[in-house]
Amino acid sequence: MTKDKAGIMYPTRTEPGVRFEPAAASSPRLSLDFLPVDLSYLGFSLADSHLGLVLLRQPTLDGAPNFLVCDPVSRRHSLLPPLPAAACTDNGKFFAPAILSHATGRRFEFDAVCATVDAERPRAWVASFRDSGCSWRALPRSGEVWINVDPYWLEQRCVHAAGSVYWHICGCQHALALDAATMAFSLMRVPDFIWEDLGHPKYRVGETPDGRLDGWVMERELCLRNALNAVPGLAEHPLRESEFSYWISDVDPGRTGRVFIRTLGCGRFSCHMDTGKLESLLTDDGMEYGDPILAYFAVPNEGSD
């Protein structure tokens, strides 16, 4: 399946909504305004972007999220049925959902997965959308993988790379992996020469242009407090001395040498590790970027239904 990078999608924090930023002047101008629901009012948020589809998640009071999948190019969409009751009654803890597959041609057919940690073992709940109908099926809990950390530390955003879905675990040498073909879970261990020698660095799983598993890691040090001191007005911010919090939220997957910095109440920034240049993450009309920032690849609608 061929794909062309169309741009990025991200929520805005200054005003509720989802923005699409084209990658080039020739890229299509896309949006999610065709959806029959008010995303911000109903609490839907971006969860995944893969194979030309966008997956949105809505939290609920009973803990089992609702999901909506759409194709911004064809403007087709589906609000998935609720997860089976067993997904809520087995004490499973939900983490980031993902798109697994998308039918070729013009068919709006796909598989998506919602994973839980049940009794310290991961389990996949798979939604299959076919012929305008959708059903869920529960796969057995993994017999090979144990999650011996609080599921809270599983990142609420997945990474697609080399035919698998990866979830980073904050502060952990392992990332949880799900093979999209076999639906088998495993733990990917970061090599000791990276994890130990570099002092438990920030790392990200990635993919090379030819589809091989890759990754990148923070090797250089930078004093974030000193870098943030250069932001006009930030030194005088009321929270600056007492409750000011800031952290590296991500490494730019485009290998630009930048990291993304989040703060509590003081905005979001990108910082170039070579030059120390700090830039505020704002749109042209002054809205602040939210999380997550997802790349979107449009898949051509070729073939027949």
Image (cartoon, rainbow, N blue to C red):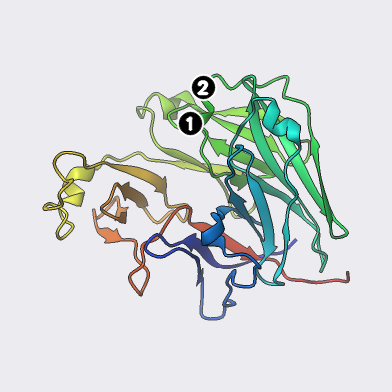
Q: Which residue is mark 1?
A: 153
Residue 178 x, y percent position in the rendering: 68, 36
Q: Residue furthest front?
A: 61
| Coordinates of residue 112 in the picture (x, y in percent) | 72, 47
Q: Residue type at mark 1?
A: Trp
Compute the Cα span from label 2 to label 1: 7 Å
Question: Mark 2: which amino acid?
Answer: Val
Q: Residue at x 24, y 43 (%)?
A: 222
Q: Is residue 51 visible?
A: no
Classed neighbour count for the residue bearing mark 1: other residues with Cα under 10 Å, few (<14), some (14–19), many (≥20) = some
Where does label 2 land, which residue?
A: 149
Could you say which is closer to the camera, residue 48 or residue 35?
35
* Image: 287 above or below 28: above
**Between residues 163 and 57, which one lies in front from this camera angle?**
57
Residue nearest the viewer, comparing 40 with 294:
40
Is 269 placed above or below 33 here?
Answer: above
Residues packed near mark 2 inside 10 Å, few (<14), some (14 to 19) or many (20 plus): few
The quadrant holding residue 290 is: bottom left
> Marks 1 and 2: in contact by CB < 8 Å?
yes
**Location of residue 298 in the rendering, given as x and y in whole percent from the top left corner:** 65, 67
